[in-house]
Image (spheres, coloured by chain):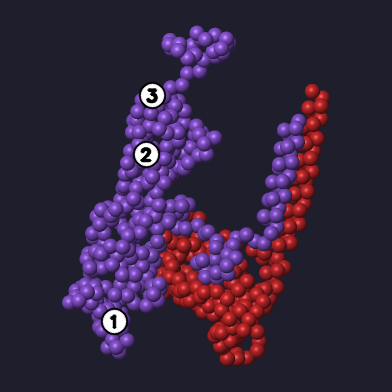
Chain colours: A purple, B red
Amino acid sequence: MSNERWLSRFSLIGVIFLLTSLCGPPASAATENGEARWSNTGVKPLIYIRDGESGGLVRAAPGVVNDDPNQYKPVLQCQVGDDLDKKCLPGQLQCPPREPGGKPGSAVIWKVAPRALENPTWTDWKSPSDGPSCLYDQKPEDLLARLAGRILSDFRTLPIKPAALGIQPSPHTLRGAETNVFADAVEQRFDVVILGQKVRVVATPTDYTYGYGDGGGLGPTMFAGGPLPEERWGEKTRTSHVYKQTGDFQVSVSTMFRGTYSVNGGPDLPIPGTGEFASPAQTVSVWRSVTRNYADNCLQNPQGEGCPGVPSK
Amino acid sequence: MYLLISGSLRSRLTLGAVFATTTAVLLGCSSGTQAGGGESVSPSASVSASVTPTPTPTPVYKRGDATGKAQNVPIPVLPEAAKANSKEGAEAFTAYWFQVMGYAYETGDIGLLTKLTGPNCEMCEGVKEVVPKAYAGDRWLSGGSFSTPTFESNFTPHNDGRIPVIVQVIQSEIRYWGPGGIEYRQPGEETNTANVAFLRFIDGAWMLDSVNPLA
């Protein structure tokens, strides 16, 4: 009876909550900050993509589209079509040599357009510095293609810090219990020089592959897992594992990073591909636990099993 | 045993009462505040009434700026080409629809936009909510006009019968003005996006059922 009464009270609270959320101000576009641009009002519309095979349009599954929808290209600041605009040249951004005896760079404006269109109109990309930037190369026109061609292998050699591996409990755990294994990886920034350009790389962890050391594994999965408070150790988590055997096992995690790169302050360009970075393995010792019940304590029966000085059977 | 039954009976009664009240309140609530769904609902009707062409002879158009919102903004006129049930007609109507949305951004008046738009358009609902807010009190916007430079369409219906028109939409920078010509927030930078507009040709005229981002 009390259960049912509780239930009805609970539903009443639920209903009241539902009512307030329905009768409050329309909740669709919740931009309290006043943003009014039509593509940024705060609603989360269905996103469509082109179906690769039929060429038709299909709804993208939620959460699938998280890449930058734009493409970018640099254009010489004073170039109009194939010609140079002579009037523009005096006011052009100066790109003096960056080291004594070096060559000056070329001023470029980055252009942006949606990736989904075959033949889009390009608009000026708004840079943080609010103006043109410099490229340092003999042929700035095809510099980006050369950069794009090698950025992935450069990315994979960066000193990207792999995830910190956590195990609960450790270094000892129990056979048959849920052992919580989790990874903690963070976004990282690197400033490097590639082909004479100052390139900023941002590496973001995306997926994790766990090896539990007993032949079991998980992933690649987007779940990094996380620590449990000690009183909840032994609970099942998305990344926990049950060891069926006792012994010492090497637990490992490998983290997949994707990245973007920005050339001399230009837009963040996607790195085509991912890099995988392994964390140092950790040993976990799996023990068995045995529960026995006894009628006496060791004072009443000093020779009983498990009492000090008594050999185990 | 008896107690148990009476207990569960009572809580069931309570539940029933709750549901009855809920339904009543829900009905009251929805008829009072909902604006988007039906066409005869009073709040939006009053808005669209103000759209009906003003008979006054055309005074000078002035774009919005720090001194005030745009004045004498001409209402976009449906071009002849946008009336045809064809690929070209669908594209021309899509271009026109974005001019109508630009009119809403320039005036704060979403009446005509609402008239040309179906109820299933999440992005339009967002615009219909934020634009009037940006004109509430002594506030107004400038900029935010639309261009639609690129279309891709082949007049093949989507699997639900709607006609998709892929359209590139560029919305110019928006500036946000408050009393005394003070900008109360950072300008919204120009956006350049790919979208798909889903149209229906109903009773001899196009209407926009939905517009969605294309990734």
Of circles 2 and 3, the one toward us is: 3
Q: Is residue B36 left or right of residue A211?
A: right
What is the crowding at mark 1: few (fewer than 14 residues within 10 Å), some, or many (at least 20)? some
Residue B170 position by quadrant: bottom left
Dot label at residue A94: 1
Position of residue B28 measured from the top left corner of the image (x, y, whole percent)? 76, 57
Going by the numbered disc 1, the residue's amino acid type is Gln
Going by the numbered disc 3, the residue's amino acid type is Thr
Marks 2 & 3, CB-CB < 8 Å contact: no
Query: Viewer-proximal residue, A221 or A308?
Result: A308
**Label 3 secondary element:** loop
User: Outermost residue, left direction?
Assistant: A101
Q: Tell which subunit mark 1 falls on.
A: A
What is the crowding at mark 3: few (fewer than 14 residues within 10 Å), some, or many (at least 20)? some
Q: CA distance from mark 2 to mark 3?
A: 19 Å
Q: Are marks 1 and 2 on the same chain?
A: yes
Going by the numbered disc 2, the residue's amino acid type is Tyr
**At x 61% / y 67%, what residue is drawn?**
B129
Q: Is residue B20 left or right of residue B184?
A: right
Q: Is residue A169 left or right of residue A214?
A: right
Residue A279 visible? The answer is yes
Identify residue for label 3. Answer: A246
Identify residue for label 2. Answer: A210
Q: Is residue A147 left or right of residue B203?
A: left
Q: CA distance from mark 3 to mark 1?
A: 69 Å
Residue A54 visible? The answer is no
Marks 3 & 1, CB-CB < 8 Å contact: no
Q: Tell which subunit mark 2 falls on.
A: A
**At x 50% / y 32%, what residue is drawn?**
A234
Instruction: Answer above or below: position of B27 versus B52.
Output: above
Residue A195 position by quadrant: bottom left
Instruction: Answer above or below: position of B39 versus A252.
Output: below
